[in-house]
Image (spheres, helix red, strand yellow):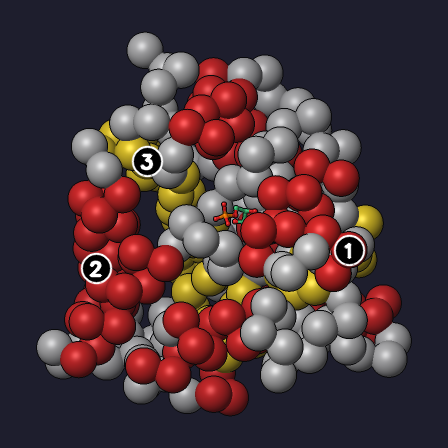
Amino acid sequence: MQLKVFKNYQEMSKYASQIVLDVVAKNPQCTLGFATGSTPLGLYGYLKQACKDGTSFRDVSAFNLDEYVGLDASHPQSYKYFMQHNLFNELDILPQNCHIPCGVATDLQAECQNYSKQLAKHTIALQILGIGGNGHIAFNEPGTSFQSTTHVVQLSPKTIADNARFFDSIDQVPTSALTMGIGEIMKAQCILVLANGKNKAQAVFNMVKGPISTSCPASVLQTHPNCIVVCDEESASLLN
Ligand code: F6R
């Protein structure tokens, strides 16, 4: 695990964007794994600018980590909406190459199986991850098997409380989601974890220095051969 600490959010986001752009430059037909949430927004800003400046994502395929159950693409808090409005609409990526699990599928188990099947046809060159305050990656909450594939998850009270800031009230936060499994995330050739802010300091510490345990799902990343953690000083403040 490589750790890169930057003075602030802008600097870490810029550095992270260079990692993504290098992967695309090396293989314009690569598959990228994307995350939602507030952490990667700075990085996505730099990717949108790079596209305006001439980098093409036309042949890139995208797989997202997760989606809330019950929210469709028109809901502003759905991850489909998030990706469209915060990234994809301003890239030349082709809509048919952008994959996000469908949170309103009538058969959620079948949707998970189908997502795993689609994913298995690709090798993710670079997986972008954020980290939850409880150490979750994607929506793999503490206790999730490191071998898991795409599945339906009941969100933990901590995740629901953390994500309530995006909704009018906590009652509106969906209580379940579809998430890529840890086993699938670990198959990525390279994993780029982003973290910023004091509220992530304990999770970052547990990920980097804690025991490898399902009680902190992100700790499994210590066993990945090519994982880069890019964070700001606040989120790295518990590390020496
Ligand atoms: C989002 C995701 C989550 C977030 C995590 C951190 O697709 O998979 O694991 O990365 O909850 O969220 P933020 O960035 O909002 O702090």
Cβ–Cβ under 8 Å for marks 2 and 1: no
- For the point 23% across and 63% down, which residue is it? 46
Q: Quadrant of residue 73?
A: bottom right
Q: Mark 2, mark 1: which one is toward the viewer?
A: 1
Given the image, on which type of amino acid does mark 3 rest? Cys
Residue 195 in sight: yes
Which of these two is toward me, 214 or 80? Answer: 80
x and y percent of residue 211 in the render? 59, 16
Q: CA distance from mark 2 to mark 1?
A: 42 Å
Residue identified by numbered label 3: 231
Which of these two is toward me, 147 or 89? Answer: 89
Given the image, on which type of amino acid does mark 2 rest? Asp
In this rendering, the answer to whether 31 lies above or below 145 is below
Given the image, on which type of amino acid does mark 1 rest? Asp
Residue identified by numbered label 2: 22
Residue with the most extreme front position: 168
In this rendering, the answer to whether 177 lies above or below 85 is above
Mark 2 falls on what kind of element?
Answer: helix
- For the point 51% across and 40% down, which residue is it? 131
Q: Mark 3, mark 1: which one is toward the viewer?
A: 1
**Mark 1: few, some, or many residues within 10 Å (few <14, many ≥20)?**
few
